[in-house]
Amino acid sequence: MRRRIVLGLAVLTAIVFSGQALEGQRARQGQFSLENARLFYEVIGTGEPIVIVHGGPGLDHSYLQPGLDVLAAQNTLIYYDQRGTGRSEAELDSGVVNFDAFVDDIDALRQVLGHDKITVLTHSFGTLLGIEYARRYADNLTALILMNPTEPGTRFADQTRTRQAAATTEEDTAEMQELTATEAFQARDAATLSEFYRVVFRATFRDRTRVDELELDLSERTAKNGQDVARLLGESLGVANGGLDWWDRLEDIAAPTLVVHGRYDIPPVAMARALSEAIPRGSLAVLDSGHFPYIEDAGGLTSAIAEFLGGLER
């Protein structure tokens, strides 16, 4: 069911633009209201529009910057914070924070910004949102880029768990246990949760020391709401009942799709290859990185995306 987007100066909570220099590009920020939420976005660059769907669930878009901003040299990048995180507001209720609403929000953003079609670039958990958007809004999609995807099922779950265990050191485990035992963690203190995620993500890097290059300073809203957002999304997806099995959905994706994966990421390259092969117009680029290629193999990532987008029929 199509939801009402609140538009116009009379009813829209004013879209506020801030002109700030960012890597030579002019950025503008805004917010728009839906029936039960208020979403924040940031637009950088000029060219074909790319909506960037962050991972988590329960994080916000800030960890993808400034790493992906380099793509703004040739494209219009549209970042946004998912419901209840960052600068996006939402009541923490299953009727408001759920998977269907998160998918529909991507198209609401497209409409608000006046684009006939968009390319969608997802990271990690955002893969699931991108897959469903491609099925639900095929006519509005130019192309799909799945960066370091979450598996849309459980075929490779055992391999992923094995790789996770091998990459996580005793020091990592001890630090996580120490942090989760603190009052600050229980109170969802932003600095403490940021440090916790930094320890968790350390295992996902090819070079573990480079985790310090990850922009991971959680906002108060993300720290406070993130765990609840993740829980509500999990409930709406039914992950507690045996997990997802969306492999058969991939054949429904009509858009040209690039799967970008790091050979040192926790989910194996075999998963990413199987995903790309299950999509009719899918292709695969394997990079020399872990889960965050814009930090560890920025050149390879930008080249792969530029080649993919340059080969599209307009």
Image (tube, rainbow, N blue to C red):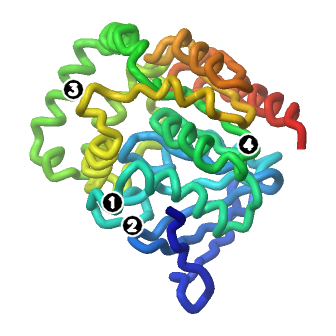
Q: Position of residue 157 (x, y in %)?
A: 37, 15
Badge number at residue 221? 1
Q: What's the CA distance linking mark 4 and mark 3?
A: 35 Å
- Which residue corresponds to mark 3? 175
Q: What's the CA distance linking mark 1 and mark 4?
A: 28 Å
| Of pointers 1 and 4, the one earlier in the residue sequence | 4
Q: Is residue 294 visible?
A: no
| Of pointers 4 and 3, the one earlier in the residue sequence | 4
Q: Callout 4: helix, strand or loop?
A: helix
- Which residue corresponds to mark 4? 71
| Classed neighbour count for the residue bearing mark 4: other residues with Cα under 10 Å, few (<14), some (14–19), many (≥20) | some
Q: Is residue 125 visible?
A: yes
Callout 3, which amino acid? Answer: Glu
| Of pointers 2 and 3, the one earlier in the residue sequence | 2
Callout 2, which amino acid? Answer: Glu
Q: Are marks 4 and 2 in contact (CB under 8 Å)?
A: no
* Rendered residue at 75%/54% (across/down): 117
Give the number of marks.
4
* Rendered residue at 54%/78% (across/down): 6
* Rendered residue at 50%/62% (across/down): 1
Q: What's the CA distance linking mark 4 and mark 2?
A: 27 Å
Badge number at residue 89? 2
85 vs 20, nearest the viewer = 85
| Of pointers 3 and 1, the one earlier in the residue sequence | 3
| Of pointers 4 and 2, the one earlier in the residue sequence | 4
Q: Callout 3: helix, strand or loop?
A: helix
Q: Position of residue 271 (x, y in %)?
A: 52, 14
Q: What's the CA distance linking mark 1 and mark 2?
A: 9 Å
Please identify the quadrant where the C terminus is shown. Answer: top right
